[in-house]
Image (spheres, grey):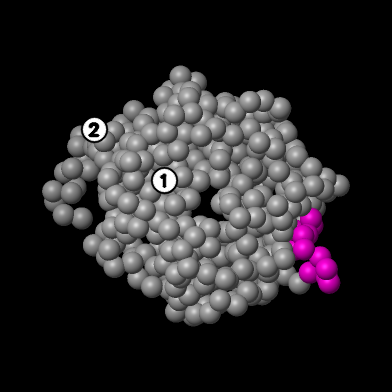
Amino acid sequence: MKHEEKEKLKQQCGGSWKLVLGYLLVGERNYRREKSQVVAGPGHSIVVTTKGDVYSFGANSSGQLGLGNTDHQFKPCLIRSLQGIRITQGSRRTMLVSDTGSVYRFGQDAFGGMEFSGTYTSSPKLVESLKDIFVVQASIGGYFSAVLSREGQVYTFSWGRNERLGHHSDLTDVEPRVLSGPLENALVVQIAAGNCYLLMLAYKPTGMSVYSVGCGEGGKLGHGHMTSLGIPKLIKHFQTLDVKPLSVSAGAFHCAALALDGSVLTWGWKNYGCLGVGHIDCKTLPVEVEGLKDVKARHLSAGSYTTFVVADNGDVYSFGLGHSLNLGLQGVEAANVWSPKLATSIVALNQKVVQISATNTWDPINGHSGRSHTLALTESGRVYSFGAGAKGQLGVKLVDGQERRATPERVEIDLA
């Protein structure tokens, strides 16, 4: 980092090198490549090993597995051209971030402009327009993609028409454009994209803050209304509640946030119980999930009308749409769960879960039916899958005629 960049960073942190260190530590926690990583896409799955090797399996009609073909895969396949990778995913497309800050893409229109175009790339390709930006995280939403730079700046591609993401562009624009406005002097440490909207967790001398931008339908931007926003806006309700956000997760139409004290807050669409606060209307402001008051959460994942929470002791809680048998609840099939329930089938594994990934991209063609699945990563480095599996996205063999699996089964991948 150049001297001028260091001085700018110091200024953004209130002129204190101690706060600069705090920012770097927070950023490292949010975008570092963990021991291993799992991502449940819509109909496909991606797994990254400790060494940064990438495995993919499931639906591949748009080349979203990165294997150089469009054949569905029912067992994990190594993407041999990649190593040293972090990861993200989106509907029928994939973006990967390397440890050196480079971004690779494959699948259908990896930038997100023409969501249903017929063009695709089935092998990983370097995103040339980002070669001068050291990227530490990427996130794919409906009709757009976003990346986060090492310097804490957010860049977006597409869905800029009518200033819906803070800049003038059309749906085919593939040039990265920085989000400024209220974020100009903020240091973003995490981004999370949902269906046509983006959440950003920013570090400030006064503490962590959450910003949102994009489509406000259902109240998912968290500002007390359902109006869409063209430029990022601070969600002030966290300060009103005296809650210190630690991480955020963007589902297709709802959001979840993990607080420093281990509490969980949700907001947005109410559908199928995905907010975990009972039969209520949409929540346009963050609200604490009362059913988790006695749980100290350490990780969460908002999906397509589902939410998973991993507790400090490794227990997993879930709520929302269970149509695909993707909630990990024994004896609960094709039911909506309106408040947090202990995921008993996961607990029965006797494995401490450290990460959950739920399908978080809504499919406008197939809706929510039969497509959602869940991946669980354990402390011992095992991967388990359950939910919809007709396209091979579970990475395990199903019996003849079976399209869904309620009980988690281990995916045979060497994560060491």
Q: Residue at x 60, y 64 (%)?
A: 45
Q: Is residue 140 left or right of residue 61?
A: left
Q: Which residue is situated farthest in the top direction here?
A: 240
The label on residue 134 is none
Q: Secondary structure at mark 1?
A: strand
Image coordinates of residue 328 in percent, x first then y, are 75, 50
In this rendered view, identify the residue nearer to me: 388 or 317. Answer: 388
- CA gap, disc 1 and disc 2: 20 Å
Magenta segment includes 410? yes
**Does the rendering let one see residue 169?**
yes
Establish if 53 lies above or below 41: below
Question: Where is mark 2, residue-wise?
Answer: 14
Relative vertical location of residue 180 with respect to residue 361 in this rendering, above or below: above
Return the x and y of residue 350 as percentages of the image width and height.
Answer: 76, 54
From this view, report whether residue 210 is shown above or below residue 240: below
Q: Is residue 185 magenta?
A: no
Identify the magenta region: 398-411
From the viewer's perspective, tell me whether residue 307 is left or right of residue 188: right
Q: Is any part of residue 352 visible from this angle?
A: no
Q: Amino acid at mark 1?
A: Gln
